[in-house]
Image (tube, rainbow, N blue to C red):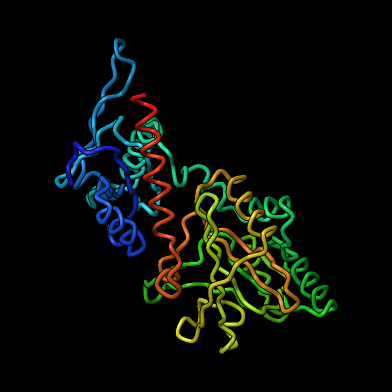
Amino acid sequence: MSDSSAPTILVLTQQIDPTADFVAHEFNRRSVPFVRMDLGEFPSRMDLSASIDSGEGDWKGAFHRPSRSVRLGGVRSIWWRRPTSFQFPEHLTREERWFARDEASAAFGGLLRLQEAFWMNYPEASMRAEFKPIQLKAARRRGLEIPRTLITNSADEARAFIRENRRAGHRTVYKTLAFSDVVNPVSGENEVIYTSVITEDDLDDGLIKISPCLFQQEVAKKLELRVTVVGDKVFTAGIDASATPEGKVDFRTSYSSITYRHLELPAEVSDALVALVRDLGLAFGAIDLILTPDERYVFLEINPSGQWAWLEIELGLPITTAICDALQGAASLQSAGRHG
């Protein structure tokens, strides 16, 4: 696509990202100029050159790539999707790679943030929103129901929590606080740690002591909900994975047996989720809820860069359109404001 066309939309994500492909195809269909770039292209497939002097006061330059460059000052919207980390030569020592990574982060981070652009989502906002203690408090402040939750590295505290839940007629589940993918030390492959029911007998005092664990009172499910919020637009998918015992706890274990349905949330829940995304400084959020058998909506978590394309395929939810509308509309406004 021509670099002379405006406005410019920057899509920052990894090279293989089927979800981002949906947006790229839609921009191509609309003949809207955009650049898809991954930080992992630096330095092998990307160069950076930028300068500033006392006369101008603005940075000039570009991120140069063989296929297409990104001119500083020409970006109007940025979709911070899932870029990978900088990839440095293997011959560097660990300390040299750390130094190079920090220098590259400082350069790219500063120059990208100087762009007068609309972000979906701003990196620092995404990073903050990923912390589950912050998510849960923010959801509660918006009147959303949340599960009873404990974060601890004390086995005694965990056992007491499990006993209290059992007395109240509830099981307890364990889930990760951050990354759910871990590397198997034997195979070297990534494995997912799914949400799982846990009992007192399952607890390993030594393992819990090493790192904080998140435990929650299990919430009875009629359906799991994946709610995708783009600005003030809300798209809700009902997910029924009750065909398997594991799927009842975590639908990700049973994709082959899941059934989907399109749902409309009550206005008060929908409005609260839009406000929650805004409170967290986000323009996009993928939110997991539980619809209980007695029709209550319980907030579980929000992912600032969560997946949604498979729901568009299953249910025809126009999420791609909403994302492209937001990025294109903001870019047009930015461009008009700069030239108005």
Query: What residue sits 36% from the left and 38% below the top?
Result: 332
Q: Could you say which is closer to the camera, residue 131 or residue 60?
A: 60
Query: What residue sits 26% from the left and 37% below the top?
Result: 6
Where is residue 61, by image quadrant?
A: top left
Where does residue 104 sit, x and y in percent of width and height? Answer: 33, 38
Farthest residue, direction right: 167
Where does residue 23 sit, x and y in percent of width and height? Answer: 34, 57
Query: What residue sits 55% from the left and 76% below the top?
Result: 239
Question: Total number of numbered labels?
Answer: 0
Q: Is residue 141 above or below residue 242?
A: above
Q: Could you say which is closer to the camera, residue 241 or residue 47?
A: 241
> Left or right: where does residue 76 sit relative to residue 213?
left
Q: Is residue 313 above or below residue 130?
A: below
Farthest residue, direction left: 66
Q: Could you say which is closer to the camera, residue 156 or residue 252?
A: 252
Q: Could you say which is closer to the camera, residue 187 or residue 73?
A: 73
Tell me the quadrant of the picture where the C terminus can be found: top left
Where does residue 90 sit, x and y in percent of width and height? Answer: 24, 52
Q: In this view, does 309 lie above or below 54?
A: below
> Left or right: where does residue 25 sit relative to residue 216?
left
Where does residue 220 sit, x and y in percent of width and height? Answer: 71, 78
Query: What residue sits 67% from the left and 78% below the top?
Result: 221
